[in-house]
Amino acid sequence: MNLIKQYIVQSLTAASNNLRLTTHQLEAVGLLRESLLNSDDILTDIDKMKKLTELSTLAIRLNEIYNFLTQRRIDFFKLSEQFKEHSQYLITDLNHILEGDNSVLVKNALNRLSGVKTIADEEININLTQNKTNSDLLISTPSAEFKRNTFISKKKAGNGHISNFEMIILDPIKPIDRMLRQMEINDVNPKDLAYFAKVMRVNAEISEKQGYEIVAEMHLIISRALLMIKSSELLPGKNIIESIQACLIVIVALVRGKDLDITNYLNKAEDFGEEISLMTNKV
């Protein structure tokens, strides 16, 4: 076996052995190890993993390990110490990507990486509130401003458009919406907030590079809001939750190119973004 591949796989195994994993989480780790073991070009596959939201943070760490093994002069007397250090870092990374319902998303992402067809979330229905505005969203006619923004965003993406861009951006939407609904009953996991804030920040950069400026802005608003909730700078009341959900609706509508009038949601999201900026500047 390739020594680099063996080192990376064994460091993942050592890390997972230090975690209490459920059956689904163990399956996800097993699938990850299998993907790396069967890889014909591990660096290329790690690069592909970076483009998948569920695996991006772990892939960055694996890339660091790969660079350590290939771009530095290795001191074999200290290699075991370095292996322990790499494994220790991976404990945190594995724990982040496998928390809660994320193990299912991770398995789906690995299947996509391997070319295995999975059941995609073709329809993302965000259950915002029980008021009439949600049904209005599904039947309204598109505004001229919305059409113009959608056209500009798609035009800017040009030839550099990532083939799985829609999948990357939309995959975290349902888990975030579930988390927001849990906030309504005061069930907030600080680790989830930190994880999804990071995912939104990464996806903001991806969206901006693809020319989706409004989508990038919505991601940054969500990322900042989640971090502020985590640090107790922002209390997750009904209005805050609905404002974040408005950002999610704008993201879904723009990325999917839906012919809908989202003006009210866009206005609510942008007002929320300004409010957050003002709060941040005061600190």
Image: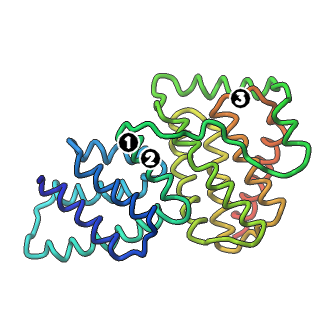
| Helix, strand or loop under label 3 | loop
x then y, percent, for residue 101: 55, 60
Query: From mark 2 to mark 3, how far is it between C-alphas?
Result: 25 Å
Mark 2, Cα crowd under 10 Å, few <14 / some 14-19 / many 20+, is many
Q: Is residue 197 above or below residue 85?
A: above
Query: From mark 2 to mark 1, how far is it between C-alphas?
Result: 6 Å
For disc 1, the marked residue is 113
Lower position in the chain sequence, tag 2 or tag 3? 2
Mark 1, Cα crowd under 10 Å, few <14 / some 14-19 / many 20+, is some
Residue type, numbered disc 1: Leu
- Coloration mode: rainbow
The answer to the question of whether label 2 and label 1 lie on touching residues, with beta carbons closer than 8 A, is yes
The quarter of the displayed image where residue 277 is located:
bottom right
Residue sticking out furthest to the right: 132
Mark 3, Cα crowd under 10 Å, few <14 / some 14-19 / many 20+, is some
| Helix, strand or loop under label 1 | helix
For disc 2, the marked residue is 109
Residue type, numbered disc 2: Ala
Lower position in the chain sequence, tag 3 or tag 1? 1
Q: Is residue 25 above or below residue 152?
A: below
The answer to the question of whether label 2 and label 3 lie on touching residues, with beta carbons closer than 8 A, is no
Q: Nearer the viewer, residue 245 or 154?
A: 245
Could you tell me which residue is drawn at 11 percent across and 53 percent down? 1
State how many labels appear.
3
